[in-house]
Amino acid sequence: MGRVIQPDVVTPASKQQCLVEELAAPVPSRNTQSKRFVHDIMQRIVDADEATLGTLLREAYTPDAEFRGSHPFNEVTGPDAIAETYWGPLREAFPDLERRDDLVIGGTYEGNEIIGCLGHLVGTFSHSWLGLRPTGKTMYLRYGEFHKMAADGSGRIAQSTVILDVLDAVQQMGFDPIGSTQGAAGRWNGPITTDGVLTYNTDPAEGASTIDYIMQMHAALQGFKGVTAQDLLSDENPQKVFWHRKMMWYGPAGIGTCRGITGFVQHHQMPFRMGFPQRLYGNQLRDAGFGGGHYVRIGDGHFAGTGGWPSVVGTHGGDGWLGLKATGKQVQMRVMDFYALHEGLIRENWVPMDVCHILLQLGIDVLALARAHFDTAPSQCAAA
């Protein structure tokens, strides 16, 4: 018989030490409490069964909460509609669904307390979802979320903006309706520093410095008008001042992940600027009467997040973006950006973008094409 390892004995002295350490711990700020709440309640929602899902959503949200989701979820109001439109179908299609947060950050913008989350939902695609035939295979559904907390002090969510990469899900099913990803496809990495779930107090001064640095980069990005590779890779491009030489730009399905300034220019920036030569960003949209613009700009430690609904309005006036010919159509772009600073520079940028919504405005219905494809393709799952 091997050696038996006895459990640690809890003595009165060790209990006293634990109490001393607990009392000495910093009191969680309101924002830290909100980050913990969102992190916890979203995990519980994913784990809920059909009988408890509605109760948990009513615990999470105010009665008139707004849900703004990527296409085809779009905009609904109230916990029951959120369950019917988003969480209910997901839970049914992926019975073993689990949630893996890579980032949980928080802050305040324009008087609103906002919590940002980034990660993947993971599960086995066992039943029909969005009218698509199940594959019986593991799928990674990447998400970006910003949750605006209620101003009434209830601690609940008043508005959720959620971008789920539906195009990436369709590609994982084995169908690519555009077939032009220039960067690397596949699952996004979490932060290189492995410390992105900030369910503890952080230094407000560091967070303020981080988001200020990001907004300086935004201003430089929008101010530089270069389009060609020669322009964008030249020393005139101010982006080189802000980004780490080993930067990672994690783009949505259709664009893909890029590494380094050269990869960023070749796989995203140049095709995007050529495809949309006329663009309005962020709060420029409000000034031009489009509404939208940034609803979030937050810094938390060395992480930051921004987003707009829409974030960009552009005219599709050039060829090449996602392999498409110019349509001349004006489109609205729902975009989020999550950032990580490392060694004093932007090391990582995760970019949830509602590409299906952009394509729909250009006359390409990704889900209709996918349904037509899978209706004529052999079933991949006997449980379909």
Image (cartoon, rainbow, N blue to C red):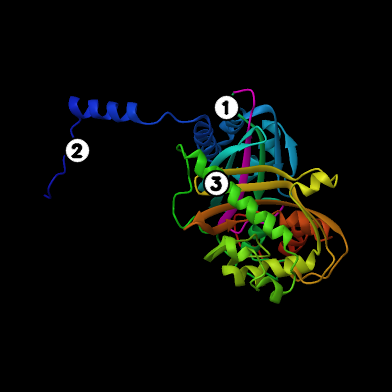
Q: Residues within 10 Å of mark 2 (few under 14, many from 20)?
A: few
Toward the viewer: 216 or 342?
216
Dot 2 lies on which element? loop
Magenta stretch containing residue 117, yes or no?
no
How many labels sit on residues? Answer: 3
Q: Where's residue 334, x and y in %?
A: 73, 50
Amino acid type assigned to the residue bearing label 2 in the image: Pro
Q: Which residue is mark 1?
A: 155
Q: Is residue 35 visible?
A: yes
Residue 314 position (above or below residue 317):
above
Which of the two discs, 1 and 2, sits closer to the camera?
A: 1
Q: Residues within 10 Å of mark 1 (few under 14, many from 20)?
A: some
Residue 29 is left or right of residue 80, and the answer is left
Which residue is outermost to the bottom? 230
Label 3 vs 2, first from the N-terminus: 2
Toward the viewer: 266 or 355?
266
Dot 3 lies on which element? helix
Amino acid type assigned to the residue bearing label 3 in the image: Ser
Q: Where's residue 128, x and y in %?
A: 66, 51
Q: Which residues are magenta?
A: 131-153
Residue contact at pointers 3 and 2, CB within 8 angstroms: no
Label 1 vs 3, first from the N-terminus: 1
Residue contact at pointers 1 and 2, CB within 8 angstroms: no
Q: Which residue is mark 2?
A: 7
Q: Kindly identify which numbered label has been placed on residue 283.
A: none
Q: Is residue 93 visible?
A: no
Q: Residues within 10 Å of mark 3 (few under 14, many from 20)?
A: some
Toward the viewer: 334 or 238?
238
Q: Which residue is mark 3?
A: 209
Dot 1 lies on which element? loop
The C terminus sits in image quarter: bottom right
Q: Where's residue 73, x and y in %?
A: 72, 45
